[in-house]
Image (cartoon, rainbow, N blue to C red):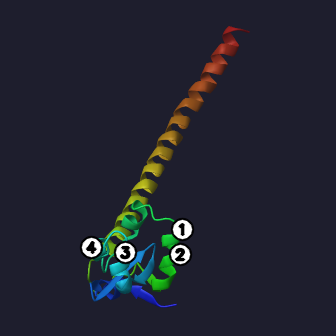
């Protein structure tokens, strides 16, 4: 299995040499440009880039997914920076990691709030129980 970084894929960005990434897999779709039902422009717009979102949004069925195997050339390394080149793939990976970090921070904040609330309410509940016990004894 061959692994390509974003710089490898980015070089294949025209009608004579067209690669795309779909779901972390690299495809050479050059020979498919003229046969693509949506026209070659659709593929050329994402040539040399991560086209996962566009592929999924188009609602491709199982037949299209099976066709991909014919054009498979390797796996995409979306996390390793490539020679200082900032590409769509690396930006998407960075955005995903940032979003994940924000979600973890938010979860930590919520848990901290819950713990503080319990620390405050638990003694109050005990005090209320004691008072109720004394009053209704």
Q: Position of residue 93 (x, y in %)?
A: 38, 70
When the figure is inspected, residue 116 is found, relative to residue 98, above or below; the finding is above
Q: Nearer the viewer, mark 2 or mark 3?
A: 3
Residue 36: numbered disc: 3
Badge 4 or badge 3: first in the primary sequence: 3
Residue 41: numbered disc: 4
The residues bearing labels 2 and 3 have C-alpha atoms spaced at a distance of 14 Å
Task: Give SS at disc 3.
Answer: loop
Q: Position of residue 80 (x, y in %)?
A: 39, 81
Query: Dot 1, how many residues are within 10 Å of its Cα: few (below 14), some (14-19), or many (20+)?
Result: few
Depth order, front residue of 82/135? 82
Q: Where, by quadrant of the figure, is residue 77 drawn?
A: bottom left
Query: Relative to 73, is 18 on the left or the right?
Result: left
Residue contact at pointers 2 and 3, CB within 8 angstroms:
no
Residue contact at pointers 4 and 3, CB within 8 angstroms:
no
The residues bearing labels 2 and 4 have C-alpha atoms spaced at a distance of 22 Å
- What residue did someone put label 2 on? 66
As drawn, the residue found furthest toward the top would be 136
The residues bearing labels 1 and 4 have C-alpha atoms spaced at a distance of 22 Å
């Amino acid at each position: 299995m061959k692994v390509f970084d974003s710089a490898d894929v980015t070089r294949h960005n025209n009608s004579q040499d067209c690669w795309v990434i779909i779901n972390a897999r690299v495809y050479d779709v050059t020979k498919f440009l003229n046969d693509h039902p949506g026209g070659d422009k659709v593929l050329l717009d994402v040539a040399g880039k991560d086209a996962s979102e566009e592929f999924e949004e188009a609602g491709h069925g199982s037949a299209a997914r099976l066709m991909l195997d014919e054009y498979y050339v390797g796996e995409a390394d979306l996390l390793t920076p490539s020679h200082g080149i900032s590409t769509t793939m690396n930006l998407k990976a960075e955005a995903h990691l940032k979003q994940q970090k924000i979600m973890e921070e938010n979860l930590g904040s919520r848990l901290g709030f819950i713990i503080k609330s319990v620390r405050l309410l638990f003694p109050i509940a005990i005090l209320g129980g004691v008072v109720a016990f004394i009053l209704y004894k």
